[in-house]
Image (cartoon, rainbow, N blue to C red):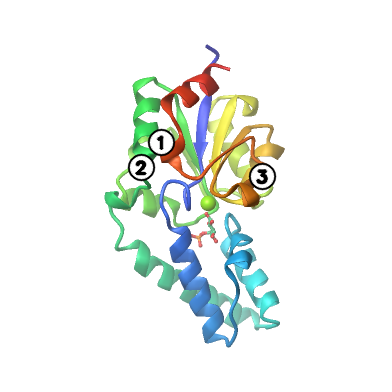
Amino acid sequence: MSQKAIIFDLDGVIVDTAKFHFLAWKKLANDLGFDFTKEQNEELKGVSRVDSLKKILNWGNKELSEEEFNRQMQLKNENYLSYVNEMDKGEVLPGVQKVLDYLEENNIPYALGSASKNARHILEKIDLKDGFSAIVDGTDVSKAKPDPEVFLIAAEKLNVAPQKCIVFEDSVAGVQAANKGEMTSIGIGEEKTLHEADYIFNDFTEISIEFLKNLLQK
Ligand code: BG6
Ligand code: MG
C-alpha cells in the first residue's frame, strides 16, 4: 500500500468547540446590539478570527475603529477561552478515539490542519497533542481556508503527497480547501451543508474501520 495520511480539522471535528465559538460570537454581536442566525454561523466555521469578526460586523451593519475591532476580537477570545479552559479528555467527540487508535495501530501518520490560533492549547486540554505527527494551525498560515495552504503545509510536514491525504472537515470552507488541495475530503456534518465533500458522515460514530481501511488502501 502506498503511504496515505490523514489530516484532521479540530473545531467541530475532534471536539465540539464550534458551539463555544458560536456562543462567544453571539455574545459579541448581542453586546453590539444585533444578532445573527444559525445559518449565518455556518459561514463562520473554518474562518479565521479576524475574518469572522469582519463578516459579523457586516451582518450587523456595524463599523468599528481599528482599536475597537482589536478589543472586540480579544474580548471574544477571552470569552471563548473561558469555555475551552473547562475542557478535558471527555470532550473528544464520540468515535474519534476509535479512528485515532486504528491509525496508530497501523502506523498511519496523521496531522492537524486548523484555522485556530488556540489549537495547540486545546489539544493539550484534551490530551491528544502527542499523537499528531504534525500540527499546523492559525499561527502557521498566511491564507485562510478555503485556501488549501493549511492542508498543503500539513502534507509537506507529513512528507506525503497532497493527493494521498484524506481530510476530515466540518466546515464548507475547509471542504473547499481540501478539494482545492486535491485531497480526499470527508465532511463531518449535514449533507445539505457539506455536499461538496467526497464523503459525508453525520459524525465519527458512523465511520467504520472497514470504510477507513478501504479508503487507505485505494
Ligand atoms: C476554526 C473555527 O477552526 O478556527 C472558527 O471553525 C474560528 O470558528 C477559527 O474562528 C479561528 O479560531 P481561533 O481559536 O483562533 O479564534
Ligand atoms: Mg472546523
The residue shown at (60%, 75%) is 36
At mark 2, the secondary structure is: helix
| Callouts 1 and 3 close, C-beta under 8 Å | no
Q: Nearer the viewer, residue 187 or 128?
A: 187
Look at discs 2 and 3 and give the one toward the viewer: 3
Q: Nearer the viewer, residue 95 or 79?
A: 95
User: Mark 2 = which residue?
Assistant: 129
Three-letter residue code for mark 2: Lys
Q: Is residue 130 left or right of residue 192?
A: left
Three-letter residue code for mark 3: His
User: Mark 3 = which residue?
Assistant: 195
| Callouts 1 and 2 close, C-beta under 8 Å | yes
Residue 60: % across, % down: 66, 80
| Callouts 2 and 3 close, C-beta under 8 Å | no
Residue 105: % across, % down: 34, 22
In the rendered view, tell whether residue 194 sits above or below residue 216.
Answer: below
- Tell me the CA gap for discs 1 and 3: 28 Å
